[in-house]
Image (cartoon, coloured by chain):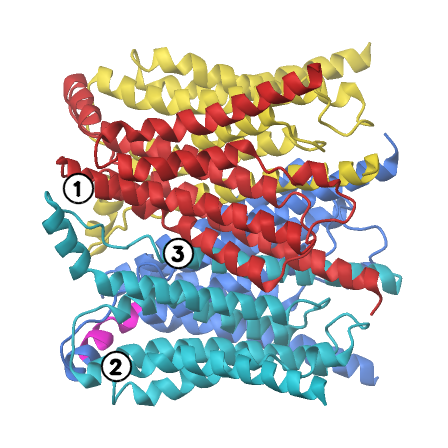
Chain colours: A cyan, B red, C yellow, D blue
Amino acid sequence: MQARKLRRFEARAADRLIFFSDAVVAIAITLLALELPVPEGPTVAALRSAVHDDLGHYTAFLISFAVIGAAWGQHNRAFRYTERADDRLRALNAGWLLTIVLNPFATKLLTTEGDDTDTVGLRFGFYALLQCLAHASVIAMERRMTTRQLRDRDVPPELVAAGDPVLYGLLLGFGLSVPLFFATQYAWILWIVVPVGAGQLSRYRARTAAAD
Amino acid sequence: MQARKLRRFEARAADRLIFFSDAVVAIAITLLALELPVPEGPTVAALRSAVHDDLGHYTAFLISFAVIGAAWGQHNRAFRYTERADDRLRALNAGWLLTIVLNPFATKLLTTEGDDTDTVGLRFGFYALLQCLAHASVIAMERRMTTRQLRDRDVPPELVAAGDPVLYGLLLGFGLSVPLFFATQYAWILWIVVPVGAGQLSRYRARTAAAD
Amino acid sequence: MQARKLRRFEARAADRLIFFSDAVVAIAITLLALELPVPEGPTVAALRSAVHDDLGHYTAFLISFAVIGAAWGQHNRAFRYTERADDRLRALNAGWLLTIVLNPFATKLLTTEGDDTDTVGLRFGFYALLQCLAHASVIAMERRMTTRQLRDRDVPPELVAAGDPVLYGLLLGFGLSVPLFFATQYAWILWIVVPVGAGQLSRYRARTAAAD
Amino acid sequence: MQARKLRRFEARAADRLIFFSDAVVAIAITLLALELPVPEGPTVAALRSAVHDDLGHYTAFLISFAVIGAAWGQHNRAFRYTERADDRLRALNAGWLLTIVLNPFATKLLTTEGDDTDTVGLRFGFYALLQCLAHASVIAMERRMTTRQLRDRDVPPELVAAGDPVLYGLLLGFGLSVPLFFATQYAWILWIVVPVGAGQLSRYRARTAAAD
């Protein structure tokens, strides 16, 4: 078989892997909303009070929607120039999919009862650890693609070599929050501050470098 | 990397965005039917009475099926010539997906108990507001595609510049119904009358213009 | 825009319609199994008795799996050479999707309580009517494609003009069973006998014609 | 119609079959996690005890995630060079999809009550039989593709003729475990040992052959 045709079949298999991953993410993100509690009440006051009681569920849904969306965005970016997949990349991707599939479960965990610091630490810590593993998988996949040249050969190295600072910010933000949740419930602030800060910092540096 | 290859990768990333959105819509529209109450009864009279009791659920399902179908149709039309996606378009699309994913929840809200005007206003108003935001996102995405030239460069401006009158009709119909639901439950009539009227009017104008 | 590029965009929009339909069918067919009752029991006898009690659910699942599979197969065949979609085809396809999405609901209806002839007639009749509408939609879509030349222009008319005898057999089998269910529960035999017979008959005729 | 165009349409229909299968697998694998029990408890001890009580569910989820993942991987590999699909291949694929769709059900069966050897045998035996049938379908599909030349004509026979030893190992491992489950609950060890062993053995042989 000519090299060109073989490459076409390899690209098709890679596309199928990407497609399959997209479908899994799409289902996980849609299922998030499936079990949202529906507020009920005969009067406006009763309705408002029902909404108030379930505020935790609505917040957890919005957070998880953003979290899965960010994970998908990173996967998307990482696979932008991918033309081939080897067994290792497939295994890493399966690990990534496992973290995605567990998100609806982890989201429910966020909103169960129990307010003492240690159980909060366990529940939120598990959620953050899951996201941390998701982003670590993406980083591992990017490295695999670089070392094994699984991307299109014409992609200039500077486009993919550095990695996305936001990705590393997500890894760091979720990772640091795991132990911190045993001290304070507000550790989730790191989930936003660290990746956004990493993105800003890198853009600032790029501007400074360009100005020099 | 040559410009042509880069464009191919950009088109592939845009296709992935579209595909992902389609999968989310497909799941949301199929989940609508998942919790339809199944009428039960040992006799025809009992069965008929069970159907009658759940008539609200069946109507809400059919409305939401049509509403999500219309939203998908507009998204489809808006992305017809899209060849690239930038961060802003992705963010707007994520907002659109959020409104889609919330549809099964909002549909359940339509059929909860509570008949006094204010709770009806809150429940139906939330549903209409959600659709209003969905269509506003599509309009924002169309504008972004126009200003940043994210569509194929050979598409003649007149094919995409004007925007679809039905889309603006949907935005207006859902938007106007939000306050009106606090006065009457029949405000949903606007959901049909305004977009259909907008479509008719624009076709009438096109015919008149062609006749001149 | 050149005609060739326009055709490419039209084909892309048609592909998106097909893809969206496939995703909906895939979800509906997978959800069928979601609510299968899980047999439980501490002993083999108890387990066997639990399976026996739920036999109706397992049969209904298998029937619906085959029914949705057949519907997808007909859709697949009908759209094999489709290169464009107009508004009417989209509307007909939306109707087809509505029948698909209602299948898990209609399957649950098959297995609710109530054994007197009239309620059986209503429950099974609704199921059969739904399938009948699904196949009628496919026939309507095939006609639209023929009259509006929505297929690739090089497809020889004899490949698509005649229509699939099995499709008409499915329409007839499901359609005839609707009134018959008010007389006997065994009307479902028509679902199998008529389409299989139609397929056999047409193959027999083709052989006879070839032998002449 | 020219042969080349016909081949393009055949490839498109085959792609649609593959895509549909992927969507079904993606949904089945994501639904696995949907009904995972969420551990609750006001203290760390209570939470830990809740996790402990549900350990069987978490293990069953992880096993089924790996099992469906492996089934998808084998399907992926089998269809790598497929350019056409005939009716028989479609029917076999429908059978494969049935086994996939039943996985969430079979996984629930693993974790129901009942510890005596015979009920364990029935529950685990059913699960293993299902996987056995899945892999037998893939083998039957590979044979069909070979005898009917449904793959790209330029694929060298040695790439596809031999079949994947891991696939045969999965078939054998699951198949042997079915009767063994009536003797011991640990028969699942075969699910891992036989396919891994088959893979190792074939790699060892390939190395020895290359060294000669």
Q: Do the CB atoms of the residues marked 3 and 2 lie less than 8 Å apart?
A: no
Residue B119 - label? 1
Q: What residue type is labelled 1?
A: Thr
- Neighbor class of circle 3 (other Cα within 10 Å; few <14, some 14-19, many 20+) is many
Real-space Cα separation, disc 3 to disc 2, in angstroms:
30 Å
Residue placed under numbered mark 3 in the picture:
D31
Q: Which chain carries label 2?
A: A
Real-space Cα separation, disc 3 to disc 1, in angstroms:
34 Å
**Vertical relation: D69 (above or below) A176:** above
Residue A24 x %, y %: 49, 59
Instruction: Name the image quarter holding the C terminus of chain B.
Output: top right
Real-space Cα separation, disc 1 to disc 2, in angstroms:
34 Å
**Vertical relation: D201 (above or below) B85:** below
Q: Which chain carries label 3?
A: D
**Vertical relation: B6 (above or below) C112:** below
Q: Can residue A168 be seen in this view?
A: no
As rendered, which of A13 and D190 lies closer to the eye? A13
Question: For this view, does C211 lie left or right of residue D40?
Answer: right
What residue is at 29 percent from the left and 85 percent from the top?
Answer: A181
Q: What residue type is labelled 3?
A: Leu
